[in-house]
Amino acid sequence: GNSVTQMEGPVTLSEEAFLTINCTYTATGYPSLFWYVQYPGEGLQLLLKATKADDKGSNKGFEATYRKETTSFHLEKGSVQVSDSAVYFCALSESGGSNYKLTFGKGTLLTVNP
Amino acid sequence: NAGVTQTPKFRVLKTGQSMTLLCAQDMNHEYMYWYRQDPGMGLRLIHYSVGEGTTAKGEVPDGYNVSRLKKQNFLLGLESAAPSQTSVYFCASSYSMASGNWETQYFGPGTRLLVL
């Protein structure tokens, strides 16, 4: 079945540092790929997505590129802020028939210190 | 728009008790989902629904039942709670005819459940 493997956390950075959170996937077909973010005490919200190979999703300074050859969708940000402290989830979609589901990775906790 | 709301926010149960978690959405979404979030396990899908009156099993359905009698509501039931069901439960919804996009899910704020 489909699966998502993402970098184990927690990740602790200083403000303005460069961020990479690795994500690789296993899937049949051609899924869409997502990064969701969960701020403390809240539900998840979509951060960015890419729907086909070589697409780059971007939002709030975060970027991720859909790499089919390496089955990866790594999240990057050039200069993190304290307000980026959150749990980040990589996910992929699967659909077919009446099956419309997202498969999530286990999440990576990011803490950014001033 | 309230988006996705969940009731209650927090609950303590004793083993063997039953309860129902309520999820409501006001975005006219067709699809609704129940997840549980546990430390080190990420989000796991319990049950989902692709339309009023329909439900389907997810990854971890055992011990839970669901109903989708109205399009805007999705109920998650625990008939006989067990300590292993201590978790944070999230509801999500997606897809409207207007957007045509099912893949962007909108999450509620969560229900924290403790089973003693």
Image (spheres, rainbow, N blue to C red):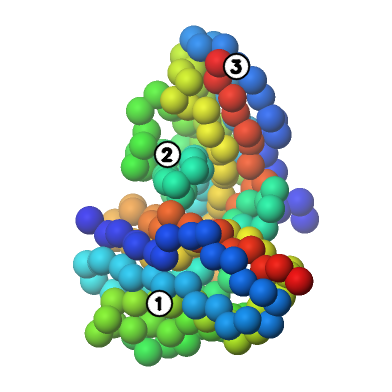
Question: Between A77 and B12, which is closer to the camera in this rendering?
Answer: A77
* Residue at numbered disc 2: B46
Can residue A56 be spotted in the picture?
A: yes
Same subunit, tags 1 and 2: no
- Is B45 situated above or below B1? above
Residue furthest bottom as drawn: A54
Q: Quadrant of the C terminus of chain A?
A: bottom right
**Chain ID, mark 2:** B
* Element assignment for label 3: strand
- The subunit letter for the residue under badge 1 reads A
Q: Is residue A30 above or below residue A69?
A: above
Q: Nearer the viewer, residue B7 or A47?
A: A47
- Give me the chain letter of mark 3: B
Callout 2 amino acid: Ile
Residue at point 48% right, 81% down? A64
Q: Which residue is mark 3?
A: B13
Q: Earlier in the sequence, mark 3 or mark 2?
A: 3
- Is the residue under label 2 in contact with that under label 3 (CB below 8 Å)? no
Q: Is residue A68 placed above or below B42 in the rendered structure?
A: below
- Name the residue type under label 3: Leu
Residue that label 1 marks: A73
Amino acid at the residue labelled 1? Phe
